Amino acid sequence: ITCQSAARRWRSKRRLNVLRTQQRECAAVKIQAIYRGFSRMKCFVITLCKVITVQTAFRGWISRRELSYLKEEKRRIENEASIKLQKMFRGLSCSMKYSLLSFSAVELQRVVRGFLAREKFIIDL
């Protein structure tokens, strides 16, 4: 009986040691899985932050380039508008000067022709 009891005790201890070893291995596998998951998540977050930084810089560069293009387009439109206004003003100014000069020439011709006609009339009398 004591031999059987010792054998059972030895077998029970052996089974207990095997179960503990399996339990430790299972716990170690779980810990490794959790650590690998954490490590991968950490790498993912760092990569995501870097991607966001690059995207932000690129979008800012595109926005600045587009703003520069819009400012240049605005300057070009304003320049064209000012040239058109100057052209119209100069045309109007020249037209008014020509009208005034033409009117003055006609008036001068009228006065001279009237004077000549009076001279001729006086001579013919």
Image (spheres, rainbow, N blue to C red):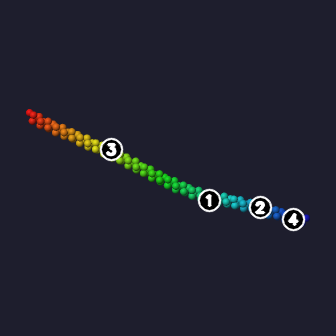
For the point 23% across and 40% down, the residue is: 103
The residue lying toward the viewer, choosing from 51 and 88, is: 88
Position of the C terminus, as image quadrant, is: top left
Badge 1 element:
helix
- Which of labels 1 and 4 is toward the front? 1
Q: What residue type is labelled 3?
A: Met
**Alpha-carbon distance for marks 4 and 2?**
22 Å
Residue with the most extreme left position: 125
**Alpha-carbon distance for marks 2 and 1?**
31 Å
Direction from residue 75 to residue 40 in the image, left or right? right
Q: Does residue 59 sit above or below 10 in this rendering?
A: above
**Alpha-carbon distance for marks 3 and 2?**
97 Å
The disc, 1 or 4, on the residue closer to the chain's N-terminal end is 4
- Which of labels 4 and 2 is toward the front? 2
Q: Provide the residue designation for mark 2.
A: 22
The disc, 2 or 1, on the residue closer to the chain's N-terminal end is 2
Q: Where is residue 68 in the image (x, y as percent from the top left)?
A: 45, 53
For the point 69% across and 59% down, the residue is: 33
Q: Provide the residue designation for mark 4.
A: 7
Q: Provide the residue designation for mark 1.
A: 43
- Which of labels 2 and 1 is toward the front? 1
For the point 63% across and 57% down, the residue is: 41
